[in-house]
Amino acid sequence: MIPLALVTKNLGKHKLRFVLTVLSLSVAIFLLCVLRSLVVALNAGVADAAANRIIVQSKVSLFVQLPQSYGPRLALVEGVEALARWNWFGGYYQDPANFFAQFATDPEELFDVYPEIQVVEGSKADFLANRKACLLGVDTAAKYGIRVGDTMPIIGALYPTADGSAWDFTVAGLYESKRKSVDQNTLFFHYEYLEKSLESGFASGPGGVGIFVLKVAPGFDPVEVMSEVDALYENGPQAVQATSESEFQAQFVSMVGNVPLLVSSIGGGVMLAILLATLNTMLMSAREQTRDIGVLKALGFTDGSVSGVLFLQALVLAGCGGLLGMILATASAPGIAAAIGSMFPGYQVTRGTLLEAAGATALIGVLAGIAPAVRARAMTVIDALRAVR
């Protein structure tokens, strides 16, 4: 039987060392949770993408605009139920640091193609009726304190106005998304407003359409629809590339780089360093307890009980640090999500991430406790009592 009272007593002998080791472990587990959550946020849009949506872009590059004339012809492709134009606006709110996504789109078709977009404040009718109205994600609205009815000035970096002034959008509604493939940070406004502004000379910028988003009707195979779309303009005037929404979302993840590999490298390095630090702490503690080991064995405690004390000490030490790190990661999640929401929408510390952190914590405890436990088990009473602290 393991004398459990000795576990807490031995850990408390050097309080400063115990606190520093726990804090080091908590920082490592906190970083592991944050890094893993970033990967989860990046992949959430890919995993939750709609199977019945197709993105049509230029085959040359996403940054090459498609002709406006493509829209009516794409809408006639068999199996296409609805079509919406999307144009990246590339502006910012008040200061370049306040960057988030804005898209010019066809307002009515937006709701047809993306039924998961739900207006939770304001009015869908007001958004449709006013050409200068916009629909704003609830997360961005909360971040900047924007309310329905406010005028939101956006400086057009990609589409600057002739006099350098801001584009003024009236916030007609705030939306929430029922799918992770659509974030809650975007501003949507009327494509017609952008189009007319370019025609009148109010603003300048690239013409054409960034992407066409197609909704496939029930009963039709999206792969066949994509093949037909690609074949439409195979010989020009500008070739297109039709992809599924999940594949399109994956393009943006790849633009950031191989994040999983980066996270694994950083997380692995941190975990190795903390494992070595914890192992060193436990070996120091075991050396200091050598005579105690001899006394316990002389009193009749088995090798398993004595080695179990040291092994359990490592588990308790790692558990305290891991639990604190997971608490910090969970508590800080809302603040981190608000700070990086425009780049990593949907950031959250999931149950799966916490389970991975718990597994890493247990692994550190086990590996750090094996060596001291094996040493204590192999030590004889005579050797232990003769040892000098």
Image (spheres, grey):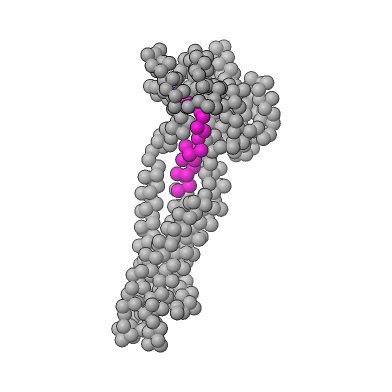
Q: Nearer the viewer, residue 58 or 158?
A: 58
* Residue at image location 46% in from the left, 56% down from the top: 357
Q: Nearer the viewer, residue 72 or 367?
A: 72
Q: Quadrant of residue 179?
A: top right
**Residue 267 makes an appearance in the image:** yes
Q: Nearer the viewer, residue 302 or 257?
A: 302
Q: Is residue 12 magenta?
A: no
* Residue at image location 38% in from the left, 55% down from the top: 270
Left or right of 229 in this view: 265: left
Q: Which of the image's four quarters has the C terminus?
A: bottom left
Q: Provide the residue span drawn in magenta.
A: 36-58
Q: Is residue 46 magenta?
A: yes
Q: Quadrant of residue 369?
A: bottom left
Q: Position of residue 15 (x, y in %)?
A: 47, 71
* Residue at image location 31% in from the left, 86% down from the top: 382
Left or right of 322 in this view: 289: left
Q: Position of residue 182 (x, y in %)?
A: 54, 34
**Residue 95 makes an appearance in the image:** no
Q: Position of residue 312 (x, y in %)?
A: 43, 71
